[in-house]
Image: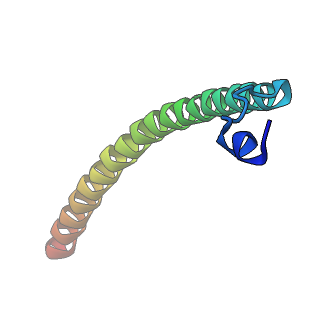
């Protein structure tokens, strides 16, 4: 075999087992990370839904307090006129 024949030979197309194992471990790690990220997002969405309900309740209470304050102001104005 001459030097030129050695350069013309195609390189071996074997993939080392360590490289395959590394790819498999990285893929498994990525899938595990994606699954845990999805779970964290789901928890945040549930928390946000609960917070939205509390925000709506506070808005209703704020409107009721405002109405009570207006009523008290009217009552006080009537009492002041009666003096």
Lateral position of residue 38 relative to residue 23, left or right: left
**Looking at the image, residue 9 lies above or below residue 17:** below
* Picture quadrant where residue 40 is located: top right
Figure quadrant of the N terminus: top right
**Looking at the image, residue 20 lies above or below residue 73:** above
Q: Position of residue 15 (x, y in %)?
A: 75, 27
> In the current view of this chain or complex, which residue is farthest to the right?
18
User: What residue sits 78% from the left and 42% below the top?
Assistant: 2
Q: Position of residue 32 (x, y in %)?
A: 69, 27
Q: Position of residue 78 (x, y in %)?
A: 16, 67
Q: Position of residue 11 (x, y in %)?
A: 70, 35
* Picture quadrant where residue 82 is located: bottom left
User: What residue sits 23% from the left and 54% below the top?
Assistant: 67
Lateral position of residue 74 relative to residue 19, left or right: left
> In the current view of this chain or complex, which residue is farthest to the front?
2
User: What residue sits 29% from the left and 60% below the top?
Assistant: 69
User: What residue sits 66% from the left and 34% below the top?
Assistant: 10
**Looking at the image, residue 42 lies above or below residue 52:** above
Q: Nearer the viewer, residue 77 or 22?
A: 22
Colour scheme of this structure image?
rainbow
**Looking at the image, residue 60 lies above or below residue 15:** below
Q: Nearer the viewer, residue 76 or 81?
A: 76
């Amino acid at each position: 075999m001459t030097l030129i024949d050695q350069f013309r030979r195609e390189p071996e197309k074997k993939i080392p087992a360590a490289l395959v194992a590394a790819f498999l471990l990285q893929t498994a790690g990525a899938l595990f990370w994606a699954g845990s990220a999805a779970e964290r997002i789901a928890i945040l969405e549930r928390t946000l839904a609960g917070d939205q309900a509390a925000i709506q309740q506070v808005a209703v209470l704020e409107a009721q307090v405002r109405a009570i304050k207006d009523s008290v102001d009217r009552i006080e104005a009537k009492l002041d006129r009666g003096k």
